[in-house]
């Protein structure tokens, strides 16, 4: 968020990840071109029944904060619209980001047309909710195919 109080909308998408039984389950992802790896919350990994490996990744983030993330067995991820079907390496963390967006968005005052709303990667972009996955730079440029639309947030 800018110091002036303006809100910046970050790119989110609903993607499908195969659970342990092989069934695709919807997960809300934050597309983060600044992340070098992909993350998943421990709660989502447990819900999906995903298997962990013995590999741990040491992390250093903002303000030199240190953490360790356990790597999962590769999973399959699918896009809602595009014919994207990729094998994905995910690392588990207890928490990855606060609920998004950070404040309510009034759709009646946005400049997004209803027909466009139906084609968004995250149809609930305006509703506060949990983020299950962070997709890093490698996946960001694979999935991001849209354009940036200005929103008037009140």
Image (cartoon, helix red, strand yellow):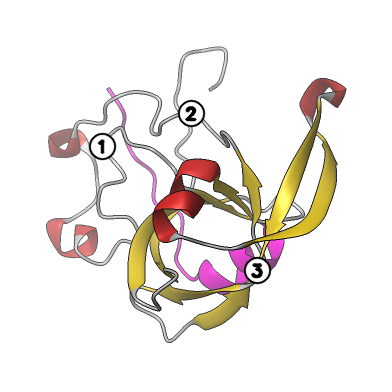
The residue that appears at 34% across and 65% down in the rendered structure is 25
Q: Give the foreground label among 3 and 1.
A: 3
Measured Cα–Cα span from mark 3 to mark 2: 25 Å
Left or right placement of residue 91 versus residue 62 in this view: left
User: Crowdedness of circle 3 by 10 Å Cα count: few (<14), some, many (20+)?
Assistant: some
In the rendering, which numbered label is found on residue 127?
1
Is 154 placed above or below 122 here?
above
**Which residue is label 3 attached to?**
73
Q: Residue furthest top?
A: 4
Q: Is residue 69 magenta?
A: no
User: Which numbered disc covers residue 98?
Assistant: 2
- Badge 3 vs badge 1, beta-carbon distance below 8 Å: no
Residue sitting at 39 percent across and 44 percent down?
150
Mark 3 lies on a secondary structure that is: loop
Q: Quadrant of the C terminus?
A: top left
Residue 123 visible in the snapshot: yes
**Which residue range is magenta in the image?**
136-154
**Residue 121 in sight here:** no
Which mark is on residue 60? none
State whether the magenta stretch is mostly helix, strand or loop: loop
Neighbourhood count class around disc 1 (C-alpha, 10 Å): few under 14, some 14–19, many 20 upward: some
Q: Position of residue 28 (x, y in %)?
A: 40, 52
- Drawn side of residue 37 relative to residue 2, left or right: right
Whole-percent x and y of residue 139?
62, 67
Name the element at disc 1.
loop
First in sequence: mark 3 vs mark 2:
3
Instruction: Please state which of residues 122 and 131 is positioned toward the viewer in this rendering.
Output: 131
């Amino acid at each position: 968020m800018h110091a002036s109080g303006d809100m910046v909308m970050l790119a989110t998408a609903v993607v499908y990840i195969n659970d342990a039984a092989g069934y695709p389950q919807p997960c809300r992802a934050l597309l983060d071109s600044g992340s070098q790896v992909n993350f998943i919350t421990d709660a989502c990994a447990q819900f999906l029944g995903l298997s962990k490996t013995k590999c741990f990744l040491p992390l250093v983030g903002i303000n030199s904060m240190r953490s360790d993330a356990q790597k999962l067995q590769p999973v399959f991820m699918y896009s809602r619209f595009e014919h994207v079907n990729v094998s994905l390496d995910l690392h588990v963390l207890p928490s990855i980001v606060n609920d998004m967006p950070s404040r309510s968005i009034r759709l009646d005052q946005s400049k997004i047309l209803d027909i466009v709303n139906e084609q968004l990667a995250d149809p609930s972009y305006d509703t506060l909710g949990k983020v299950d996955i962070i997709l890093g730079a490698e996946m960001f440029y694979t999935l991001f195919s849209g354009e940036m639309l200005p929103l008037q947030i009140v």
